[in-house]
Amino acid sequence: MYIFKAGVIGAGTMGAEIAQVISYSGLPVVLKDVDQAMLERGLTRIRDIYQRRVDKGKMSAGEMENRLALIEPTLAYDSLSDADLVIEAVPERMDLKKRIFAELDAVCPETTIFASNTSALSISEMGAATKRPAKMIGMHFFNPAHVMKLMEVIPGLDTAQETVDDVVSFAESLRKIPVVVQECPGFLVNRLLMPYLNEATFCLQEGAADAQTIDRALTEFGMPMGPFTLMDMLGIDVCGDVGLYLYSEYGERMAPAGLFHKLIAANRLGEKAGAGFYGYGNESDEPVKAMIAEMQHTNGVRTNTPFCVERLVYPLINEAALCRQERIAGIADIDMAMVAGTGMTWHGERMGPLALADHLGLDTVLAGLEEYQSAAWGGERFRPARLLKLKVRAGHLGRKVGKGFHEYTG
Ligand code: 3HC
C-alpha cells in the first residue's frame, strides 16, 4: 500500500521532527496535539529546521514554504479520516497511547496503519487494544529525528507482514534506513545504549572520573558525542524512564545508577531544562558534584572505582551479543542499527558493536567482562552472554582468526 497522507499525534520535539521528515519527503502530514501552545512550539521547531537548511544554502525560501504548506496543524481528529498511516509520538504512558489509538480507531478507515514511536513499550500490547492489531507497528525514530538515519521497525505478535513491508518502503521513501527488530523491551538500540549510558553514570557517581573526562574519552574512542552530552540531549527523564523499564523487564543487569533519580528530583532534566549532567546558560554542574558527594557520604555509594572506556563499551557489546542470541535482529542489522542510530565509529571507520568485538578480539572482550563481573564494584551488569562464551570456546575469536560474529577473508 502506498502512503499518500500521514498523520503524527503529539507536537513535542519528536513529533515535530517526524512531521518535518515526512513533509521534507513531499508528503502531506497532519500534526495533531491537544494543546495549541504545544502545536505552535512544534511548528516553530519545524520552521527552524527548514530555516537552517535555507541558511546553509541547501534549500530555497520558496521550497521551504512549499514543504511547510504540506503540514496541517490541528487540535481535532477530523483531518486524519483519510490518512494512510498515523504515527503516535506522545509521552511514554501505555494508558495514554491506548486511549489515542482507540480514538483513532473511531475516525480512521480500517486500512490505516497505526504506528508508535515508543522507545521501549510493547507494540503487541498496543495492537491488542485496537480493532486492527494486524495494522499496528513500531516506527522508532532516533534523536535528532531529522538527522539520524535509522528507523527501527518493530512488528508486534499480530502485525501482518504486509504492514511491515509497507512501513519499510515508507521509511525508505523518507530516506531513512529501516531495520526490522523483533519486539523486546527497549527494542535494539535503546537496549544496547542503556547499559552503556548507565555505566557512564555509575562511573560518575563513584568518582571514577568526571563527566568531561568520560565524555572526552568516549568521543576519542569513536562516539559522536559523549554519554553525558547525549543524555542531556535525550532528556534525563527519558533516560530515567527507559532505564527503569528495562530494569523491571531484564532485572539486575540493568539496575539503574542512583544519580538518575537525584537529577530528576532536582529537575535537572537535560538541555531542555537548562541543566542536566552539565549546566547550560547561567547554570553550572556544581550541584551535580554536590549530589555525588552526598551520595558517596550518606547513600553508601562506592568511591574511586576505575574508569576506562571498556567499562562502558563492553556492556554494550555484551547486550548486542544477547540480542543476537535471542534473534532480535541479524548480525549485520545489529551493527547497521547502531551505526545509523548512534553514529558509532572506531578508528575513523563506521563500526557497530559486533564488528567492534571482532576487531578487539572476542576473547579480550570476554576476559574484560569476566574481570568486571568479579570485581567488588561490578557484578551482574557484566555477566557475559552465553553466545560470547560459546564463540570463544569454538575459537571464533574475531578478525585475527578470520571468524567472530562476522567472517573475514584476507
Ligand atoms: N539537540 C538537537 N539537535 C541537535 C543537537 C542537540 N543537542 N546537536 C546537534 N543537533 C542537530 C543540529 O541542529 C543540526 O541540525 P540541522 O541539520 O538542522 O542544522 C544537526 O543535528 C547536525 O548537527 P551538526 O551539524 O552540529 O553536526 P554534528 O557533527 O555535531 O552532529 C549529531 C550532531 C548528529 C547529534 C551527532 O553528535 C550524533 O550523531 N550524536 C549521537 C546521537 C544519538 O546517539 N542519537 C540516538 C540516541 S537514542 C534515541 O534517540 C532513542 C530514543 O528513544 C531515546
Image: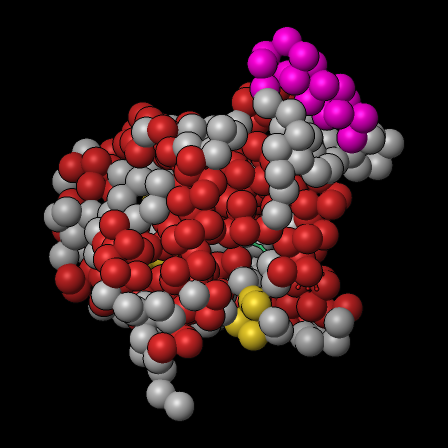
Question: Who is closer to the viewer here, 65 or 168?
Answer: 168
Q: Position of residue 317 (x, y in %)?
A: 42, 54
Q: Position of residue 292 (x, y in %)?
A: 69, 22
Left or right of residue 95: residue 33: right
> Residue 268 appears in which quarter of the rendering?
top right
Left or right of residue 156: residue 224: right
Residue shown at the point (30%, 69%) measured from the top left: 396
Locate ligand 1 by image quadrant: bottom right
Question: Residue 299 colored magenta?
Answer: yes
Q: Residue 170, relative to residue 233: is it above or below?
A: below
Q: Is residue 29 visible?
A: no
Q: Position of residue 301 (x, y in %)?
A: 59, 19
Residue shown at the point (64%, 9%) measured from the top left: 298
Q: Residue 397, relative to residue 74: is it above or below?
A: below
> Residue 180 appears in which quarter of the rendering?
bottom left
Q: Residue furthest top?
A: 298
Question: Residue 170 colored magenta?
Answer: no
Q: Position of residue 60 (x, y in %)?
A: 70, 75
Which secondary structure type mostly characterizes the magenta part of the structure?
helix
Q: Is residue 320 visible?
A: yes
Question: Who is closer to the viewer here, 249 or 97?
Answer: 249
Q: Residue furthest right?
A: 282
Q: Residue 235, relative to residue 158: is it above or below?
A: above
Left or right of residue 164: residue 270: right
Q: Residue furthest bottom?
A: 410
The range drawn in magenta is 285-301
Question: Dividing the image into 4 quarters, which one contains the N terminus?
Answer: bottom left
Question: Dividing the image into 4 quarters, which one contains the C terminus?
Answer: bottom left
Residue shown at the point (42%, 38%) measured from the top left: 373
Q: How many marks?
A: 0
Residue shown at the point (69%, 76%) measured from the top left: 58
